[in-house]
Image: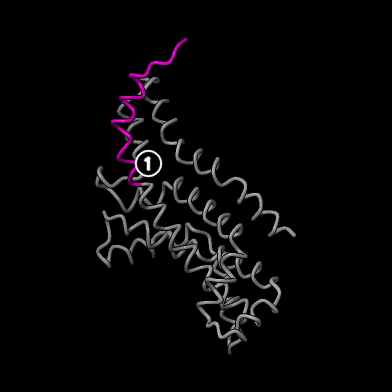
Amino acid sequence: KYIRWVNYTAAWRAVSRYIYNSLIMSSLTVIMVVFLSSYVGYIFARYKFPGREFLFYAIISLLMIPGALTLIPQFIIVKNLGLLNTRWACILPWTSGGQIFAIFVIHSFMSSLPEELFEAARVDGAGIFQIYTKIAIPLSYPTLVTIAIMHFVGTWNDIIWPLVTITKPELRPVTVGIMAFNSAYYQNYGPLFAGYILASIPLIILFIFTMRFYIQGLLSGAI
């Protein structure tokens, strides 16, 4: 009926490196997804060019393809690039796959922004990238935070892709590492459940500090 801190000590020694790996891979993926998808969504929403509608719907149509169908082709590509058993084996596929939904959401939000704001910036001599950084990004901040949270949680909890692309124990993310930890502490429930708690702490901290922006992003998308 009291906390056995020795269980948390044993669990931390076992899962800390896995948490570190997941933090690196998920954070880099989120940064790349938010930047690339926000810029692409901004271009599609605020500028007209030949083939814009076709390209946009071609990108969005990829949402209809189940992830299981792309598992083998992605694995072959990653293997041919020599990225197996590296962090980039997860970062690059997560980045490419996570942009599709993010582009759709950001495009929908930026399309609803008043054109007068962008026209005023053009009159003042602002370029495409200046308008993007000074107007589009600040106005879309809640939506971008929502995308970042959703993608961080999705990559943090992904298990199938890291399981087939990373076999080195020192590079395993937390989901795959917890499986190995589970096998090592089978029926030793103290360290086992302490490891589960430690693995969930980064997500709890993330939601504590970003929940307000997450709700704002959901409401802005709904309205």
Give the answer, above or below, for where 61 lies relative to 143.
Answer: below
Q: Residue furthest front?
A: 124
Q: Horizontal placement of 154 versus 10: left or right?
A: right
Residue 149 % position (x, y) = 53, 51
Identify which residue is drawn at 61% across, 50% down: 214
Residue closest to the eye, 9 or 155: 9
Instruction: Give the vertical position of 205 relative to 120 (above or below).
Output: above
Residue at numbered disc 1: 174
Pointer 1 local density, CA inside 10 Å: few below 14, some 14–19, many at least 20: many
Residue 39 percent coordinates (x, y):
52, 72
Which x, y percent locates residue 73? Answer: 39, 65
Residue at the (56%, 78%) spot, across then down: 43
Q: Position of residue 95 (x, y in %)?
A: 43, 62
Which stretch is magenta?
1-21
Q: Is residue 153 left or right of residue 124?
A: left
Q: Can the viewer see residue 64 in this picture?
A: no
Q: Is residue 153 visible?
A: yes
- The residue at 33%/41% (across/down) is 18
Give the dominant element type of the magenta stretch: helix, strand or loop: helix
Q: In the picture provided, is 153 more to the left or to the right than 28?
A: right
- Amino acid type at circle 1 is Val
Label 1 SS: helix
> Image quadrant for the C terminus?
bottom right
